[in-house]
Amino acid sequence: MEVEVLPELKFAGVVSLGNFRYANNPQVYLGTAPSDEAFKLNFNKGIKPMGESLLKNYFLAGGPQCAYSLSMHYEDPNFWRLSVFGNYFSRAYLDPNPVLRTANFFTDLDGHPFPNYDPVEAEKLLIQEKFPSYFMLNAIAGKSWRVGSHYAGFFISLQNVLNTRFITGGFEQGRNANFTSLKEDSSRMKPLFSPKYWWGRGATYFISTYYRF
């Protein structure tokens, strides 16, 4: 929506609501360079089928699924302008590792479930992590002058003015591909193979000047 309060001043609002999930349980395959060692690990010509991965209804990763924005835009008759944006993002999730959702997670080398396998604890270990929601304040401003028949000016962009700390994405590692190893690593004070996260930038700015002729 957009509301013009004055010829020089207007407010705008944007809302985006999403609910993006896996629609089915895909088949998972591992690939490697063909070798005798790979063949002993059940790789056929470098390919090993892992079976079905129970990903259905897990949330898709890749950014927040909901976003809200409210902004103010001012353009002065004296050729300067200012815009301020308040943005709120929510419902972003960690990218789940598909191998952890296959039968390999609870099956020992003999084809039977691990003796210590606990379905309740396994469910807790495989809960998809939801990232914290966050608010960002951005602003842009500019000014221009007429110099004879030419124009000069500058432009400033301020991103994340409040220096908000936030996660943009991440993924589960696959080194702990079964219940026993994942449980052991999760019980450490500092897990060795915890999820990898992508962190957003802090407060940043961009300034440009120009002369147009």
Image (tube, helix red, strand yellow):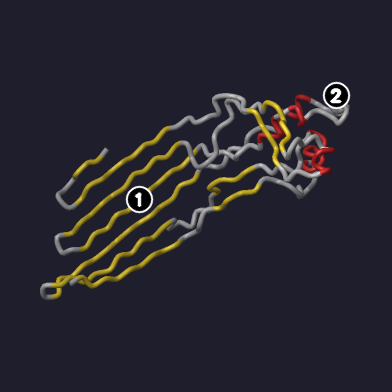
151 on left or right of 100: left
Residue nearest the viewer, comparing 201 with 163: 201
**Snapshot quadrant of residue 138:** bottom left
Residue found at x 29% / y 54% = 83
Q: Quadrant of the C terminus?
A: bottom left
What's under tag 1, amino acid-wise?
Answer: Phe
Q: Residue furthest bottom?
A: 148
Q: Identify residue for label 1.
A: 85
Of badges 2 and 1, the one in the foreground is: 2
Q: Position of residue 180 (x, y in %)?
A: 82, 35
Percent x, y for residue 102? 71, 29
Residue shown at the point (53%, 47%) measured from the top left: 168
Residue type at mark 2: give it: His
Mark 1 is surrounded, within 10 Å at the Cα level, by few (under 14), some (14 to 19) or many (20 or more) other residues, namely many
Side of 30 where 70 appears, left or right = left
Quadrant in the picture for residue 204: bottom left
Residue beneath the point at 65% across and 28% down: 27
Q: Residues within 10 Å of mark 2 (few under 14, many from 20)?
A: few
Q: Name the residue that disc number 2 marks.
A: 112
172 or 89: which is nearer to us?
172
Using the image, determine if residue 56 lies above or below residue 143: above
